[in-house]
Amino acid sequence: MKDVIEQLASGRQLHIDRLVEWLRIPSISTDPQRNGDVRDAGEWIQQELSRSGFAARLDETDGHPVCFASWTGAEGAPTVLIYGHYDVQPPEPLELWRHGAFEPTIEDGNLIARGATDDKGQVLALVRGICGVLQQRGSLPVNIKFLIEGEEEIGSPNLAPYIEAHKEELTADVAVISDCSQFAPGIPAITVALKGLVYLEIFVQGPNRDLHSGSFGGAVENPANVLTRILGSLRDEAGRITIPGFYENVRDLTPEERADFASLPFDEDGFRDDLEVPQVHGEAGWTTLERKGARPTLDINGLLSGWTGEGAKTVLPAHASAKLSMRLVPDQDPDVIDTLVSDHLRSLCPPSCTIEVRSHHGAQPVLVERDSHWLDAAARAVEKGFGKAPVYIREGGSIPVVSDLKRILGIDTILLGLGLPDDNAHSPNEKFHLPDYQRGIETAAWFLDEISS
Ligand code: BES
Ligand code: MN
Ligand code: MN
């Protein structure tokens, strides 16, 4: 292995150059104007893989294409399915970026660009590490399949049908995903839980047109007042969600799990100071790490009504809307919660207005089986690649495919985060720490070694 690792280390600049090229493609999956760019980013990774000795293709779906690649020359050896996504979030607000979001720039050892950590940098680390082994050895010790999609950031609407349709081809023993974070700089981690997601949009309709708030106020219900009253009632003073039945299937943390959280070296003051908030906040009775990783949450993600331009306009708006999401934990079911919450919201609308609730994408919560030789192999690989044994953490983010892989293919997933908690995923100046990129590349190579031994 030493020769392979040395070779990967000497290829450092080339690994960076390849990532920079991929990051220049603005593959924003939610923006139909960018459909061509999204496809280009899919083609880019397909070519990268086929150049390195994988049988790679770009498959059409009803949305953005999926890149599938495989190398299955290790007869009798296990098969690892590696998932990642080549689409990115929109870069706005643009004025907060120090450089163009799609003009990758290196600053203090960080590569700054939209998609740097989420997820192009992390996917490419696995790709370069594995392809490096293949190129030097002429073979791999295990079979590898890549599934790299272009719709993760919009909820992977076409991926489950794709997996169903390619079930045989995607057969594997275990999946690996690098699309999350280490615990802190110098503390690598394996993620053992992800939250689920329910995302709703609420429309409250009042009068058929905007009205003079003096002439009509008091006589006609204001949908903005109604909507904010409804939204305000969804959490109580103690930060608990008030929707009847919401907590019904929440699995309690065991004393061991709470001890695991407590044993992590979390710098709460640093966390607070970085965000410049006066204090942290959340459901009473739980620590910050427990709230982030293991308690369900409810957040308003967008609010729209009335006059939001410069200056004042005395208007009674015709409608008000909000985007609202809930992060779920085991064993909450997104479909059940969606119905429960939507019905509750409708029941809160007074007869003086009408309400409509629409559902966007969702995701199932994930809890990884800790007692697994795959996980142990991954931990040994991280220890070799990062020079330090990983801690086990729970993340608040969601990755819809994980439950689909379990349901359709029957396989577990190892979540091997290479990013850092302050990488600014979805935010301006998203970054990926280049030494972590290199460690990720080497960890991928070690992983092949560890699972085949
Ligand atoms: N990479 C993230 C998921 C993630 C973030 C995992 C932080 C662990 C920690 C992924 O690209 C993402 O942003 N997922 C979306 C969900 C999707 C349904 C839009 C999310 O979590 O909001
Ligand atoms: Mn991601
Ligand atoms: Mn994301």
Image (tube, rainbow, N blue to C red):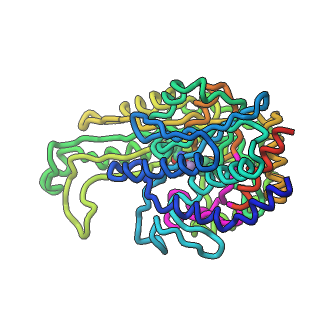
Q: Is residue 120 above or below residue 377?
A: below
* Quarter residue 158 falls in: top left
Q: Residue at x 74, y 50 (%)?
A: 133
In the depicted view, which residue is nearer to us: 116 or 236? Answer: 116
**Magenta residues (range):** 416-437
Magenta stretch: dominant secondary structure: loop
Residue 87 appears left or right of 441: left
Q: Quadrant of the C terminus?
A: top right
**Magenta region includes residue 251:** no
Whole-percent x, y for residue 243 in the image: 50, 35
In the depicted view, which residue is nearer to us: 232 or 343? Answer: 343
Q: Residue furthest front?
A: 138
Q: Is residue 359 above or below residue 214?
A: above
Whole-percent x, y for residue 217 in the image: 19, 51
Q: Residue at x 41, y 62 (%)?
A: 92
- Is residue 237 in view from this perspective? no
- Number of numbered markers: 0
Q: Is residue 117 above or below residue 404?
A: below
In the depicted view, which residue is nearer to us: 223 or 451? Answer: 451
Whole-percent x, y for residue 384 in the image: 84, 54
* Quarter residue 442 falls in: bottom right
Q: Residue furthest left?
A: 215
**Magenta region includes residue 418:** yes
In the depicted view, which residue is nearer to us: 237 or 362? Answer: 362
Q: Residue at x 72, y 30 (%)?
A: 173
Residue 429 appears left or right of 419: left
- Is residue 45 in view from this perspective? yes
Whole-percent x, y for residue 422 in the image: 62, 63
Residue 315 appears left or right of 151: left
